[in-house]
Amino acid sequence: MHRPTIALTIAGSDPGGGAGLQADLTTFTRLGVHGATAITAITVQDTRDVADFDVLPARRLADQIEITLADLPVAAIKIGMLGSAENVETVAAILAAHPHIPVVLDPVMVAGGGSELATRAVVDLTRERLLPRATVVTPNTPEAARLSGHDDARRWGETLRALGARNVLITGGDAPADAEANRQSLPPIVNVLYREDGHMRRFELPRLPPSFHGSGCTLAAAIAAFLARGRDLEPAIIEAQGFMTEAIATGYAPGRGQHVPNRLCPQAG
């Protein structure tokens, strides 16, 4: 039997399955990739917001990652919520020992409902230690502002590149709240890729009215899945965005809060 390629997600657990490592695993499966996991935090959340979370000790996180990398031929790594400065340091050290594995860094800092998921120390260490280790960083606009340290959107990409990021994909999925509330026509989602060769490319995707939970996790996991399957970075991003367009268009509300992208495998018949 053909063995599928393997990707590892290092992320927090979402009990409702909308975001975090559960979103990553369903995305990997949908895209034909075997998913391995290293849990960074146990969250108490629903589709509306994060109520609380407990971060796993750095040593326990390191044990999960190291035993997985020693046993499985991991072809890509996706990083989400890390939760503590110690976990950031731990992951950075492990990535330094495995420089051949492509890494997609989704710098999770704020939950969809607005709860803070990263302290100032986590943000600072992510900037200093993880940006240079990632193949691509995928911040949304608030995360790009926090990582770059300023509010000038025109300079976020170049600032993050100057800080050591090889490639930066700034995602524009955050819908204008006033437009949605007033049922105005929503502008397209604009994602901007700043490549390590100095070139920039804009991608425009359709924006649908509902707000989504786990969309950033899903896009980053899809990029990691396509990298694991051997795609170069830009084709991986293009295919991942195509997957996201379909997943958003067929998204659904599993609970009383936000919608989630449809990452389910097609039903037989």
Image: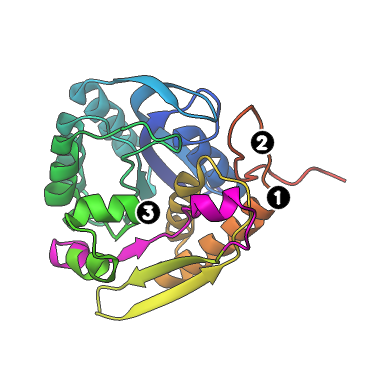
Instruction: Report the side of 81 relative to 92 (left or right).
Output: right
**Nearer the camera: disc 1 or disc 2:** 2
Q: Which of 57 and 15 is in front in this view?
A: 15
Mark 2 to mark 3: distance in Å?
A: 22 Å
199 relative to 264, above or below: below
Would you identify the image quadrant in which residue 195 lies? Answer: bottom left
213 relative to 48, above or below: below
Would you identify the image quadrant in which residue 87 lies? Answer: top left
**Nearer the camera: disc 1 or disc 3:** 3
Determine which residue is flagged by label 3: 140
In the picture, the disc for residue 253 is 2
Q: Nearer the viewer, residue 14 or 256?
A: 256
Q: Is residue 5 visible?
A: no
Residue 133: give x, y in percent of width and height.
Answer: 20, 54
Q: Can residue 264 be seen in this view?
A: yes
Mark 1 to mark 2: distance in Å?
A: 10 Å
Check residue 161 for magenta coloring: yes
Q: Give the range drawn in magenta.
A: 160-186
Q: Is mark 1 on a helix, strand or loop?
A: loop
Identify which amino acid the numbered label 1 is placed on. Answer: Thr
225 relative to 94, above or below: below
In the picture, the disc for residue 250 is 1
- Density class for disc 2 (Cα within 10 Å; few <14, some 14-19, many ≥20) is some
Name which of mark 1 and mark 3 comes first in the sequence: 3
